[in-house]
Image (tube, rainbow, N blue to C red):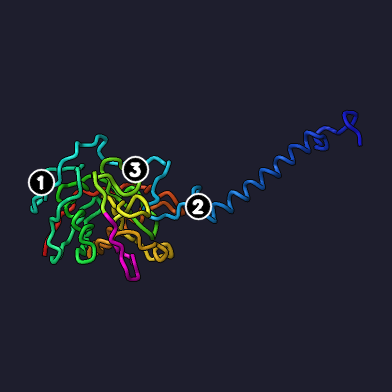
Amino acid sequence: MADSDSKTSPGTSTSRAGCARSGLLALGGVFIVVYMVLRIWTGGSDDGDDHRPDNTVTTEPHVTTTLAVEQDAVAPTCPDEDGSSPRTLRFTDVPPLCIDPEATYVAIVKTNRGDFEITLDPAHARKGVNSFVFLARYHYFDGIAFTRVLRDYLAQTGDPVRGDVAGGGDAGYLLPEEPPKERPFYGEGSVALANQSPTQNSTGSEFFVITGSGPQVDQLPPLYTRIGTITAGQNVIDAIDATARANDDIGAPTELTVIESIEIEQH
């Protein structure tokens, strides 16, 4: 075979350089195919994220209405039941028991898209419900947004300090998990507390609403404290779900849904 003495016509690709380029293009095509197969296998996530509420760290920036500066931590005392306690974002320890475990509590969540209600379940999640009521009465959730929304799956919020949905929230304390024991663990309309890891004692202030009934919901393991159920305002939950990006695996919504306040009623 000829080397440098080979002659080619203009526009042909029989030279060694042309063959090398063709080889590189073919190799690049193989890499693309392998990459796409891996994306499908992991659900579209580079790190294998299975979209569980504890796996929420992303590199995509999130628009947030949260505070930029953390407050100094204060010792936890039960807030005023009428909602008159000042807004507080950091505590030095877990809250004392501030609810009546035998009573029924309803959280009225007011957002810029309308209101929805959560009927809380202290009988099955006393510590989780107590923490949620404690934080709500300290206006902890006021002004923050649902920063993670996955279509027909979940909408997550609850961290007013960082706002980056890094998992769990940061009120200055963590709780042990009180996971459900019977199926379905988390049906459509369930409200549960996110956590920072599958290990125990990592539940914080973030919470999520199950917005659909797809296979991801069925596969969600019982690792999260279910504190209640949506009992009014399903149209608002649907509107929040509609802000999810199509075929998205990150969760940054197209528009923010901001919690204006959460009022707690005892019945």
Along the line of sight, the residue nearer the viewer: 92 or 139: 92
Q: Are marks 2 and 1 in contact (CB under 8 Å)?
A: no
Residue type at numbered disc 1: Ser
- Residue 148: percent from the left, percent from the top? 35, 50
Residue 44 is labelled as 2
Q: Is residue 71 above or below residue 253?
A: above
Q: Is residue 191 visible?
A: no
The amino acid marked with disc number 3 is Asp
Give yes or no for contact between labels 3 and 1 (Cβ–Cβ under 8 Å): no
Q: Quick one: label 2, few (<14), some, or many (20+) residues within 10 Å?
A: some
| Front position among marks 2 and 1 | 1
Mark sitting earlier along the chain (2/1): 2
- Of labels 3 and 1, earlier in sequence is 1
Determine the CA span between mark 2 and mark 1: 44 Å
Q: Which residue is mark 1?
A: 85
Residue 3 in the image: above or below residue 105: above
**Which segment did they paint magenta?**
176-192
**Residue highlighted by disc 3:** 164
**Residue in the image at 34% along x and 43% along y:** 164
Q: Is residue 168 magenta?
A: no
Q: Residue furthest top?
A: 4
Query: Which element is circle 1 on?
Result: loop
In the rendered image, residue 190 lying in the magenta stretch gets the answer: yes
Along the line of sight, which residue is nearer the eye, 106 or 132? Answer: 132
Q: CA distance from mark 3 to mark 1?
A: 26 Å
